[in-house]
Image (cartoon, rainbow, N blue to C red):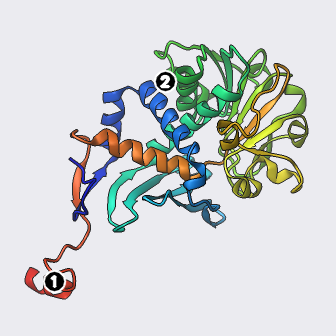
Amino acid sequence: MPPSASPLALVPFVSVENMMRLVHHIGVEQVLAELTDEIEADYGRWALFEKAPRLASHSVQGVIELMPTTDGTLYSFKYVNGHPSNAARGCQTVAAFGMLARVDTGYPLLLTEMTLLTALRTAATSAMVARRLAPAGATVMAIIGNGAQAEFQALAMKAVVGITEVRLYDIDPAATAKAERNLGASGLRIVTCTTAQAAVEGVHIITTCTADKSYATILTDNMVGAGIHINAIGGDCPGKTELHRDILTRATTFVEFEPQTRLEGEIQQMDGAYPVTEFWRVLAGEMPGRRDARQITLFDSVGFATEDFSALRYVLGRIEGSQFYQLIDMLADPDDPRDLFGMLQRAA
């Protein structure tokens, strides 16, 4: 069993291989549904969390970020990068790992890969918001940008919202073909499109998840009809957007943590007076979500540390009593806590 009650020197580590084994053991859609509920439960405890915009180190090539938070009992952080040019090198655009620790001792409880886990928690967060904001009876979604996130987003919307049809578009036809192939056995009806305009025709939800770190216009105002829910997850750093600003003037916009989204999200295009609602307020009943069938709702999602916290805690609970982790020796544990040097000498 992974340590949970007492601080031990051996720390559970979930490798990429074991994360994949865990997800297949539970089932991808089941994991997405359970993660959705876990994240929503922590959004319901929003006031308990320490909140700050992530610490980002930007370069010409991309960005490296640290995302920490705590609820006063547990502490988590994630290391994550964003390098769009990595795909051309045969590398992941996003790679990540994370840790969960006890606040009272500072001892780690879990170290895990978070490249897969971030894709899962991002999709679960999208689904959490969509089940509150999407139009009633939503069954058709478009995904603009068919890279690493696309299949996770589609399956989360299927498992949590009830989507039955997904319309795919990417400027790279190979990415669309990849997503179509991967979703072939999902039970979803898959429609591939040659333009973004064609992809959004007749849909209830539009998800944009492109990787290029530039001001872009993936959706123009004329492409968004009344009643649509937009899930904008690609804009996640200063200087990167996906939506024409005119869409924002028509939409009711919901965010994770406003100070971070003002810097990184679609709303960086707007002035500081542009109104947004932090989504936890909807769950708390302090603010309305969708008010009517014609309202355009926008989830301007950049990813926030509480979602990683939820995902890490979920994994810790799920590996208990399993074989989907290994214990690693990463903490010095002398017999006398004050005699670290003595431990080193005895090792000789």
What residue is pinned by disc 2? 182
Q: Pointer 2: residues within 10 angstroms few (<14), some, or many (20+)?
A: few
User: Residue 16, image x and y in percent?
Assistant: 35, 45
Note whether residue 91 is visible: no
User: Residue 329, image x and y in percent?
Assistant: 21, 64
What residue is pinned by disc 1? 344
Q: Residue at x 76, y 24 (%)?
A: 195
Under tag 2, what secondary structure?
A: helix
Q: Residue at x 61, y 17 (%)?
A: 163
User: Residue 153, image x and y in percent?
Assistant: 57, 30
Residue 222 falls left or right of residue 23: right
Q: Which mark is residue 313?
A: none
Amino acid type at image mark 1: Leu
Q: Residue at x 53, y 44 (%)?
A: 42
Q: Is residue 9 above or below residue 147?
A: below
Q: Is residue 198 above or below residue 312?
A: above
- Marks 2 and 1, the one that precedes in the sequence: 2
Q: Residue at x 65, y 61 (%)?
A: 53
Q: Quadrant of residue 139?
A: top right
Nearer to us in this view, 132 or 191: 132
Amino acid type at image mark 2: Asn
Instruction: Point out the frontmost of discs 2 and 1.
Output: 1
Residue 66 falls left or right of residue 169: left
Q: Is residue 111 above or below residue 245?
A: below
- Decide: marks 2, 1 in contact (CB < 8 A)? no
Nearer to us in this view, 266 or 86: 266
